[in-house]
Image (cartoon, grey):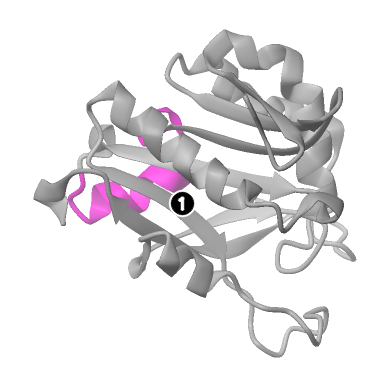
Amino acid sequence: MTGGGLTFKTCSGRAIEPWLGALARLRIEVFRDFPYLYDGSLDYEENYLRAYVESPDSLAVLACDGDTPVGATTALPLADETEEFRRPFEAAGYDVGRVFYCAESVLLKSHRGRGVYARFFAAREDHARALGRFDWSAFCAVQRPDDHPLRPADYAPLDPVWARYGYVRHPELRTSFAWKDIGETRASAKPMVFWLKPLREICA
């Protein structure tokens, strides 16, 4: 599969394992920027990403420039995610077995503006629909204060983009997840808010 001068590799479950190193490196590089400010390590990343190898219905799509991965998106059933991500849905009365969790989309700056981000969203939603048992597509985003000292002057939140793709912010669905920020000596919990999109008309 090709597009935007890139080729796309799609895999699920155990087939993701050979790509764990590439996924880890992309996440570390892209999430170092605001708003995540992530100071990650390959060891932690590869351990974190192993959930996608263990989930038979997971998805990874890698965008490659030649043989080099320059972007990726991942997703898996929410039921296969950690308790931090399941808990808000369980508390709100959702059936987590009906929610497909879109974990992240990362793309190097040098390859942005080619429609890859939209393609990543479509791939995850198409995968969830093909599995045939999900009512919702969901992802979560970190919440940073507007006056954060590391917020770039030209920073533009992606909220309008996500809304254009059909996602709605649900401030009542909140969680926290711990990682080490740039400048921190240890990991600390970061607030996260979920966005949802119905995958079936009955949920609209």
Residue 34 x/y as whole percent? 76, 68
Residue 201 x/y as whole percent? 14, 48
Q: Which residue is situated farthest in the top direction here?
A: 14
Residue 118 x/y as whole percent? 54, 51
Q: Quadrant of residue 146?
A: bottom right
Does residue 12 sit above or below 154 in this rendering?
Answer: above
Residue 195 seen by the camera: yes
- In the rendered view, does 200 fall on the left or right side of 100? left
Q: Secondary structure at mark 1?
A: strand
At 63% from the left and 22% from the top, the residue drawn is 50
Closer-to-camera residue (64/58): 64
Residue 45 seen by the camera: no
At 39% from the left and 39% from the top, the residue drawn is 125
Where's the N terminus, which quadrant?
top right
Closer-to-camera residue (75/3): 3
* Magenta stretch, residue numbers: 77-94
Closer-to-camera residue (148/66): 66
Residue for badge 1? 139
Q: Quadrant of residue 6?
A: top right
